[in-house]
Amino acid sequence: MPHDRASNTDDIIVEVKGLRNSFGESVIHDNLDLQVRRGEILGVVGGSGTGKSVLMRSIIGLQTPDTGEITVFGEPTIGRDETEATDIRKRWGVLFQGGALFSTLTVAENVQVPLREFYRELPRSLIDEIASYKVVMTGLPADAGPKYPAELSGGMKKRAGLARALALDPELLFLDEPTAGLDPIGAAAFDELIRSLSRTLGLTVFLITHDLDTLYAICDRVAVLAEKRVIAVGTIDELLETDQPWIQEYFKGPRGRAAASTQELQDTDREADAHPTEVATNRTDTRSQGTLADDHARGATPTTDDTGRKATGTG
């Protein structure tokens, strides 16, 4: 499990109060409240149709809610004039589902879009240099810059979209289903990239996902959308203590149990890397105890080897 790097509840980057969103007669959110803390990776989950993406779009100004308040960096975002809204938007980056790259632009040109939009006075050479750096930062090869989206794999498109989201050195990063469509190895690598960038750059991350492995691997807290609002928010351990049926089914179902087991193995491997001798000894002791128990059940006779440890032999 990730460490809680955002324990100061007074340091709120995003705050949503009493949010209501509807499309015609269909109400998506009603009296929704949520806080995102500085420096945390907040996972946002919920069933289909609960409005996870609508919530994100409301926060970044692409969806105007019926009622409610939204503040980002302590500034209200609803009803701001264009200049004020631009000053706030410069401080966040967004990775939409699928990467949302412009198909007629190269990877480098896609990354340059926010730079050209917000900093038109920058010289072309500097824009090119920044774009090249962001491409490499997200794990793409340096020669990916001149390529078009159609020439990229799904995982490379995600990384290119992430490079564009990071173009302005944002403090806040919005990710909408970043690992959707990736194979397990690619998804795990993308998770590790997000965690590494978050720690290195001091990012706050708002992450919409269905991927339980992602939740266990990198999220400090998880917000659960259901019943048109956020019904719970906390660490996975805290959520597991609730008796809400959807939460229990989500995290304790077959996929949830598999994700938890995978994370336990990864945590053990990290511990082994940090303290190889201690972990190796613990593993040996555990195997030895298990072997002795098995041998006792088979009627084997324990003996002692040259190191003083008990060994077994059959009569």
Image (tube, helix red, strand yellow):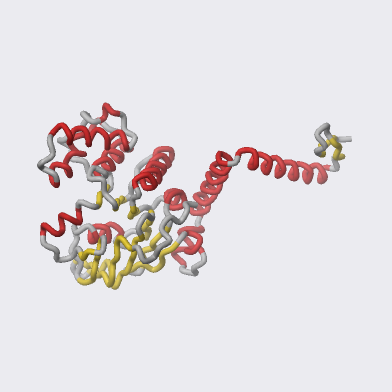
Q: What residue is rendered at 42% in x and 58% in y?
A: 221
User: Residue 24 placed where, x, y %?
Assistant: 18, 68
- x 31%, y 29%: residue: 141
Residue depicted at x 40% and y 46%: 195
Check the image and report above or below for 83 versus 183.
below
Rendered location of residue 182, percent (x, y) = 37, 41
130 in relation to 24, above or below: above
The reply to whether residue 149 is visible in this rendering is no
Considering depth in this image, is 38 or 36 the residue closer to the camera?
Answer: 38
> Percent position (x, y) of residue 100?
22, 44
Name the residue at 27% across, 66% down: 28
Q: Is residue 106 above or below residue 64?
A: above
Question: Along the line of sight, which residue is nearer the eye, 141 or 297?
Answer: 141
Check the picture and name the quadrant holding the C terminus.
top right
In the rendered structure, the answer to whether residue 91 lies left or right of residue 193 reads: left
Q: Quadrant of residue 282?
A: top right
The mark tally for this picture is: 0
Q: Quadrant of residue 250?
A: bottom left
Q: Residue lying at the far right in this picture: please name it.
A: 315
Residue 130 rendering spot, x and y as whole percentages: 22, 36
Asked if residue 164 can be seen in this view, the reply is yes
Q: Is residue 23 left or right of residue 190?
A: left
